[in-house]
Amino acid sequence: MTGPVHRIWDTVPADGWEDAFLAGNGEYGIMVHGQPHSERIVVNHHRFVLPNGTRHARPPRLAALLPRIRELILAGRRAEASRLLAGDGVLRWTQSFHPGFALTIDAAGEPIGGPGGSVDAAGVPAAPDYRRHTDFDTGEVVVQWAGGQRRSFVSRADRLIVTHLDMADCRVGATGELPGRPAGVRYAVSAYRRDGLVFLRVRGRYPRAGGAYGFEGLTLLRGEVTVDADGVLVHGPALLLTVLDRPEHRWHSAALARRLAGHRDARYGALLARHTARHAPAYRRVSLDLDVPAAQRALPVGELLARQAADPHTPDTALLERLFHAGRYLLLSASGVLPPRLTGLWLGSWDAAWAGDFTTDANLNLQLATATVGALPEVTAAHARLVGDQVDDWRRNARAVYGARGLLAPSRTDGEHGHLFHLHPDWPFAAWLPGAHWLLLPLYEQHLVTGEPLGEVAGWLVEVAELLADVLTATDSDGTLGFVPSYSAETGPLDATGVPVHVAVNATMDIAAARHAFTVAATLTGDDRWVRLAARLPAYRVEQDGALAEWAWPGYRADENHRHVSHLYPVWPLGEITPEDTPELAAAAHRALRRRGDENLSAHGSLHRALAAARLHDGPLVQANLLKIIGRDMFFRSLMSAHNPGRVTYNADAAHTLPAVLIESLVQGRPGRLRLLPAPLPGLTGGTLRGVTCPGRITVAELAWQPGTVRARLVSKATQRLRVRSPYGETVVRLAADEATEVAFTAQAAH
C-alpha cells in the first residue's frame, strides 16, 4: 500500500507543536516540529502523568445513604440528593498527562541555507526545496531539503525512538522548557561518554505528591559525535536511539543504558524494517478510495485544508479520504500499552485540557469505534489491558457506593487506577451506572467480529449485569423496577428555573445497558432469571412530540442543546433500535437526534450524532454532522484534530472517530445481516472500501459503488447464511468458510 493517499506532506515548517508531525508505537510518541535549521522532537510516554495526590484516592462510602438518596430523588428533591452523592463535594481530577522533553537539533556554524543564503519574511534562514512528510504505511516522519534530511520513527519491535541525521554539522541537546511546565518540576540534562558510547540524558523530577518519583529519557548517539557540555556535537550522518521510563522510586538510567548498548551496532534501515513488519500489516488492513483525482491526492496537507476552508458547506472528498487514513494511522500509533487518551499519545505542553486523561463517558469509546469495524484489534487489545488492570477497582467502587456486587466504572482515569472519585453535586458520576457496560462493549463487539472466546471478559460482563440487578429498585407501589439514582452523562432534567439537575430516575442509557447486559448474561450463564429480569425493565419513553426521551420518567424536561446524546445508546452502539426491526422507536430516536442542539460544537458531540445518524440510515444528517468538524477548521496540519472549532484545544476525538463514521455510512453488519450503503453521504457518489470487519465474523474484502450499482466481495470465517441489503434490493447468500463470495445490486434490478 503506497501512494500519496497514505501520507501527508507539507512545504511549511511547523512553528508550533500543535502542527508537529506525529509518530508512535502505542507507548512512546514523538512530535517533530520547528525550522529546518532548528528542530524539536517532543517525546511522550503514555504513562507520563503528573502526581497530584489522587493516586490513592478512593470512592466515597455512600451505601448507607442510598435509602435517603432514593427518597429525595423520588420526592423531586434531586439537588439535595446530588449533594449526598458527591461525598465531600470536592471535585478531584486525575493525574494530568504531560510531555517529557524535547530533543533539540540545531545547525552549527552557517545556517542550512549556506553563507549569504536567503531568509523568509520572518528573517529565518530558508532551506531550498524544504519538505516534510509522515508516511502512514511505515510510521516515518521525514524532514528534507536540498542537501539534508532527518528521518524519525518509533519502533513497535524494539521500543525505541529512532532518528537518523544526514545534514551539516549540528548540535543535539534536550530541553524541558515546554509551555506550561510547573515550577516544581525540575529538569537535569547531561551528556557523557561511557564504555565508548555517547549518551544524552534527561531527568525530570516531580514534586512529591503521592505519585511516581520522576521520568527520564536516555539517547544513544552514534556516528562522529563528541560531548559538548550538556549537549553533543554531530559531524556528518548520525543515528539517535532514545528510550524512556517513569521510575517509581529511583532512576533507571543504568538499565536504560544497557538497553541501548544492545543496539550499538543497529542500522536505521534494519530497525525500520523490524518496526514496519509490525506496523504496516495493521495499517494496511483497511483502505478507502473515493475516486479522488490524482492531482488532488498529490496536494500538500495545507492545500487540502485550505480547499475545505474555501467551501465549508461541502465535504472536500480529497481531504475526507486523507482524514480516513490519517485517523487509522494515528489511532494505531496511539494504542499499545494503553488505548488513546484525549490527546491520543501526544502533547507539547503541560496544560492538557481535562487532564489529558481517558474520559470514559463518551470520548474513549468514540475513539475506539474505529478499532472494531476498522480492523485494528491492536487498539481493542490495548483497551482490554486498561480494563483488565482496573477491574478490581471497579469492584471496590460498586461495594463502596452501592454495597453491591459487580462493576462500577469511573468517568475518567489517568491509566494508573480505576477508582471513582471525580465527584461533585454538578457531576454525580456515582450515579453513572452503565459505565462498565459501555467500556466493556468494545471487547464484546470484538468477540462478535472474530468469534474468538471471550475469556475473562465473559465474567466481567456477568458482573456488569450483577451491578445493574443489585441497584434496581421499586419506583412505585405496584413494584415497577427502575434505576434510582440515575445519570445521563453529563446532563440532567431541568428544574423549575431551567437549570439542569443531573441526578434523576431511569436514564434511557441505563435501561438500554441493563437490557443488553441481562440478555448477554443469560446467554453466557444459561440462567433464565436474567431474561425474566430484562422483561421487568421500564419501557423507553416517547415524548408528546414523538421524540425518544432521555429519561423514562414523567415530568422531566431535557436540555436539548446539550453536547452528549447518551439516550441514543440503544441506537449506537447497541443496535437495539433499528429502522428495520423497531421502526416506531427508530423514528422516535431520529426525532430526538434531529431536535438536539449543538451546544459548543464539541467534536465528540458531532461525531456521536453522526454515528447515530448512520445507524438511522440518514446520510444527509451524517454529512451535516461531519461538516461541523471538517467545515469549521478543526484539524491541525498533522491532521490531528481539535475539540472545538478554530483549532481550539488539541484533542484526538475527531481524528480517531471519523473513520468509523465513514465506515458506518457505507457498511453496517450484525450476526446474520449485512447492509451496504445504509447512509451514504450525498457527495460521495462512488468509491471503494476494503477490509472492513463486521459482527458475525464477516470481512467486507471489497465494497465498490457507483451511481445505481453496488457490489461487494465478502469473506466469512464460518459457513453461514447472510442476508445482504442495499439501496437497490436484498438477497440471501450462503458463505463458505474462508471463501470469497460476490454480491451485486443495480438500480435496474430493484425495479
Image (cartoon, rainbow, N blue to C red):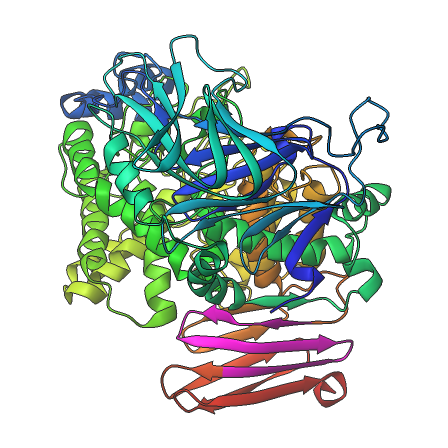
Vertical position of residue 242 compared to residue 577: above or below: above
Q: Quadrant of residue 89?
A: top left
Choose between 636 and 110: the one closer to the eye. 110
Q: Where 383 falls versus 171 (above or below)?
A: below
The total number of labels drawn is 0
**Quadrant in which residue 171 is drawn:** top right
548, 45: nearer the viewer: 45
Image coordinates of residue 455 in percent, x first then y, are 20, 62
As drawn, the residue found furthest toward the top would be 183
Q: Viewed as shown, does residue 710 lie left or right of 499? A: right
Query: Which stretch is magenta?
Result: 688-714
Q: Residue at x 48, y 57 (%)?
A: 272
Q: Is residue 1 visible?
A: yes
Q: Nearer the viewer, residue 443 or 325?
A: 325
In the figure, is residue 320 to the left or right of 649? right
Residue 47 in the image: above or below residue 373: above
Q: Residue at x 83, y 47 (%)?
A: 307
Tell me if 241 is positioned left or right of 323 in this view. left
Residue 107 at x, y percent in the picture: 65, 30
Quick one: quadrant of the C terminus?
A: bottom right
Magenta-colored stretch includes residue 694: yes
Is residue 481 part of the magenta span, yes or no? no
Residue 634 in the image: state x and y as whole percent: 68, 37
Name the residue nearer the viewer: 715 or 204: 204
Res 488 seen here:
no
Question: On screen, 300 above or below 425?
Answer: below
Residue 260 picture location, percent across and down = 33, 43
Magenta part mainly helix, strand or loop?
Answer: strand
